[in-house]
Amino acid sequence: MLTSVKDRPVIVTGGSKGIGKGIAKVFAAQGARVMIAARGADTGQAAADELRAAGGQVEFCQCDVSDWESVQNMVSQTVDAFGGLSVMCANAGAFPQTKMVDMDPGEWDQVMATNLKSAFLCVKASIPHFEKAGGGRVVLTSSITGPVTGFPGWSHYGASKSGQLGFLKTACMELSKYNVTINAVMPGNIYTEGLQDLGQDYLDTMAASIPLKRLGNVEDIGNAALFFASDEAGYITGQTIIVDGGQIIPESLEAMEEI
Ligand code: NAP
């Protein structure tokens, strides 16, 4: 099962750290040829080296996903290195936590560009190569924050993650012409370096509010992305999957105490 990505060229934006690195690891373990993309060259190169040392076919390219020229370069570099493009995992994202009263409007624009405009840019740059290949897959990393839940300080982030799902609906129709599916994974709280910065108290409180009593790990998201990218998921498009250990289900703190 889910072995169809073997030797297929895959881009994972934000693949140098956290969830993106987890997605890259899961795809590389299935024999895919993975280009990880991020702005930071040292961290990105180190991640590619680490995944290659574990036996993966993994390269790194520097890219700012909010910049059209940079995204086009990322896709060209991938096609040059691997001979085509089969899967675009548009995962890179930023989540500065700032309440609206303190938020500079420029921060709003930056979060939208990194999280939402980037999804459009990554898809747009991929279309000619998917068309050439006769098909392809896009997997977006959205979030439960925005589409399902709210959290003070993340108005811009939540809007960008909901926006990705609005984009998904029309993109799935336009991409069907090229035999391309597009779906989104909606992670709950996943244990990453980024989340670590929020402190142990935050992590412990979050774990206590999740029915499965743990934060997710990056491979949990990688496995969902692998499913959407696989041949087995070929008839699924425009859809979402929440991967959150049941986090959004309890209707009150009391409900959690009943477990
Ligand atoms: P992370 O550990 O902070 O990693 C973010 C990655 O994105 C890094 O590789 C970073 O590298 C890259 N990146 C950021 N801005 C970029 C830009 N403008 N251009 C290219 N790359 C950029 O974050 P994460 O927790 O893994 O989050 C990854 C995705 O999952 C995001 O879309 C996030 O919204 C989503 N998500 C995360 C969680 C969670 O619990 N962690 C939950 C729900 C959704 P550089 O900084 O070097 O560019």
Image (spheres, helix red, strand yellow):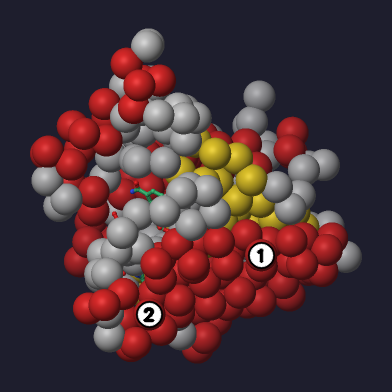
**Quadrant hosting residue 62:** bottom left
Using residue 199 as the reference point, say whether residue 115 is left or right of it.
Answer: right
Amino acid type assigned to the residue bearing label 2 in the image: Trp
Q: Which quadrant, please, contains the N terminus?
A: top right
Left or right of residue 166: residue 43? left
Please tell me in which quarter of the rendered image ligand 1 is found: bottom left
Q: How many marks?
A: 2
At horizontal 34% and vertical 27% (from top left) the residue drawn is: 253
Instruction: Mark 2 or mark 1: name the one nearer the start of the chain.
Output: 2
Q: From this view, report whether residue 249 is shown above or below residue 121.
A: above
The residue lying furthest to the right in this view is 177
User: Where 253 falls versus 164 (above or below)?
Assistant: above
Residue at 45% over, 62% down: 158
Residue 48 visible at all: no
* Image quarter of residue 175: bottom right
List x then y, in percent, for residue 248.
Answer: 47, 35
Q: Is residue 159 visible?
A: yes
Amino acid residing under circle 1? Gly
Mark 2–mark 1 Cα distance, whole angstroms, equals 18 Å
Judge left or right: residue 157 versus residue 172: left
- Give the residue displayed 54% in from the left and 54% down from the top: 147
Residue 122 place in picture, x, y as percent: 57, 72
Q: Which residue is mark 2?
A: 108
Graded by Cα atoms within 10 Å as few (under 14), some (14 to 19) or many (20 or more), the crowding at tag 1 reads few
Q: Secondary structure at mark 1?
A: helix
Q: Which residue is mark 1?
A: 166
- The numbered dot on residue 204 is none
Along the line of sight, which residue is nearer the eye, 210 or 224? 210
In this view, 216 is above or below 236: above
